[in-house]
Image (spheres, rainbow, N blue to C red):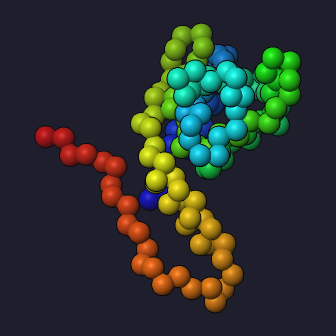
Amino acid sequence: MTSNRPYLLRAFFDWIVDNQCTPHLVVNADFPNVIVPMQFVQDGQIVLNINPTAVAQFHMDNHEVSFNARFGGQPMRVVVPVGAVLAIYARENGEGTVFTPEDFSEYEEHEESLLDEAKPEGDTNDEPPKKRGSHLKVIK
């Protein structure tokens, strides 16, 4: 099954905005392919205001969150892979959710599988597909 993170992220975003609150993302700035203003990163993380009134050209799909924003008066395109999102919450009351940090290696495996899908027909890979372990734990 695919990750539920992008679905939960969209649901919490909609819920926060529908309740007239300001959605903020906590992002792992060290995650591969993250593009954020590094001068505002603290302890490897950055908090981003993704309120529709604060950003332009906002896009959220199963792979990334992207938008244009101004930081210190300078325009910037921000790109956050969904795996880099650590939390989403409402600034006004802290309501939201925290995600478990994703392992970079799982992200890199996903990127490799996307590249494999994009290979032209006839291109073969002799390596067997990698199996991912379950992220679920049994609680007794």
- Tell which residue pokes out farthest to the top in this image: 92
Q: Looking at the image, can residue 16 be seen?
A: no
How many marks the image carries: the answer is: 0
Q: Residue at x 25, y 45 (%)?
A: 137
Viewport quadrant of the N terminus: bottom left
> Residue 114, how many percent across, how many down?
60, 65
Residue depicted at 70% across the width and 23% down the height: 39
Say whether residue 119 is visible: yes
Residue 28: give x, y in percent of width and height: 55, 33
Quarter of the figure with the C terminus: top left
User: Can you say whether 13 is above or below 92 in the image?
Assistant: below
88 relative position to 128: left or right = right
Relative image position of residue 103 (x, y in whole percent): 44, 46
Q: Nearer the viewer, residue 48 or 10?
A: 48
The furthest residue to the bottom: 122
Q: Is residue 95 left or right of residue 10?
A: left
Residue 83 placement: quadrant: top right
- Please, is residue 9 above or below residue 26 in the view? below
Q: Quadrant of residue 36?
A: top right
Residue drawn at x 43%, y 74% is 129
Using the rendered view, name the quadrant where residue 65 is placed.
top right
**Residue 132, percent across and down?**
38, 61
Name the one closer to the observer, 64 or 103: 103
Q: Is residue 35 left or right of residue 131?
A: right
Residue occupying the point 33% across, 55% down: 134
Horizontally, residue 121 falls left or right of residue 30, namely right
